[in-house]
Image (spheres, helix red, strand yellow):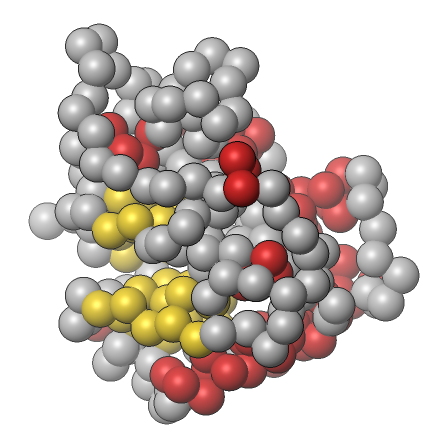
Amino acid sequence: MTTQPTFAPTLDAPTRRIDSSAWDDIYVVGDIHGCRGSLERLLDELDLTDDDLVVFVGDLVRKGPDSKGVLDIVRERPNLLSVRGNNEQKLIDGRKTIDALTDEDYDYVESLPVAISWDDALVVHGGINHRKPVVEHTLTELLNNRSLVPGGSYDRPYWFETRRESPRVFFGHTVLAEPFVTDHAVGLDTGCVYGGQLTAYDYRDDELVTVEPPETYVSRSADSIVEPRLAEPAEGQ
């Protein structure tokens, strides 16, 4: 029997638990970043029915050309859900704005849960630091976790490369040269806004589905694109 992860009562964001038995197929999709064309290509490739569910790892918005178009697609279909990413949080906090978005769009962004779970699966944007209980994670950590080095960002070890605990965490945020799939962590941000593929994970069949983007919208330095590798957890981690 699996249970819903317990989050801090002070977490200033909702969480959501879904019943996986209500859906035929479940897909988890990496960061979109306003790339409506890539999203439409992927949805066509998945050929969804109303009984299939798609869960996005957050960062639907910013950087790409059509954040509003992406929000419209996801918001208007009841079988498309998303967690909140750090770029949605920037809109909520007022650190960033997107002129094309309406008040309704901002309300929808603010309503996004920070986590969605089912069975023994957990979707968050950044990740889970397995060195401490889930309940002790802050909103900022759930949205931004990457390195296990205090104050580090792109310093190894990364949390997902050393994770050996349940639940299995599906995440984005860290741009990967290729998807990262283990029994304990699945990384799906393959940088579609930077010219990489848009990646989905088929939860039922344990398979990846990818599409190429129509074009590259933003350049990114090679040292901020991670070549994922499985690592042995260091002592004490």
Q: Nearer the viewer, residue 177 or 91?
A: 177
Figure label count: 0
Residue lying farthest to the left in this orientation? 1
The answer to whether 19 appears left or right of 73 in the picture is: left
Residue lying farthest to the top in this orientation? 236
Q: Quadrant of residue 54?
A: bottom left
Position of the C terminus by quadrant = top left
Residue lying farthest to the front in this orientation? 222
Q: Position of residue 46 (x, y in %)?
A: 37, 83
Q: Position of residue 133 (x, y in %)?
A: 31, 23
In the displayed structure, 74 sits above or below 7; it is below
Q: Nearer the viewer, residue 92 or 221?
A: 221
Q: Position of residue 85 (x, y in %)?
A: 57, 47
Residue lying farthest to the right in this orientation? 99
Residue at x 20% of width, y 21% of height: 233
Q: Nearer the viewer, residue 178 or 5?
A: 178
Residue at x 72% of width, y 42% of height: 90
Residue at x 38% of width, y 72% of height: 210
Q: Position of residue 27 (x, y in %)?
A: 34, 69
In the displayed structure, 110 sits above or below 200; it is above
User: Quick check: can you spot residue 8?
Assistant: no
Residue at x 21% of width, y 36% of height: 230
User: Quick check: can you spot residue 182?
Assistant: yes
The answer to whether 143 appears left or right of 101 in the picture is: left
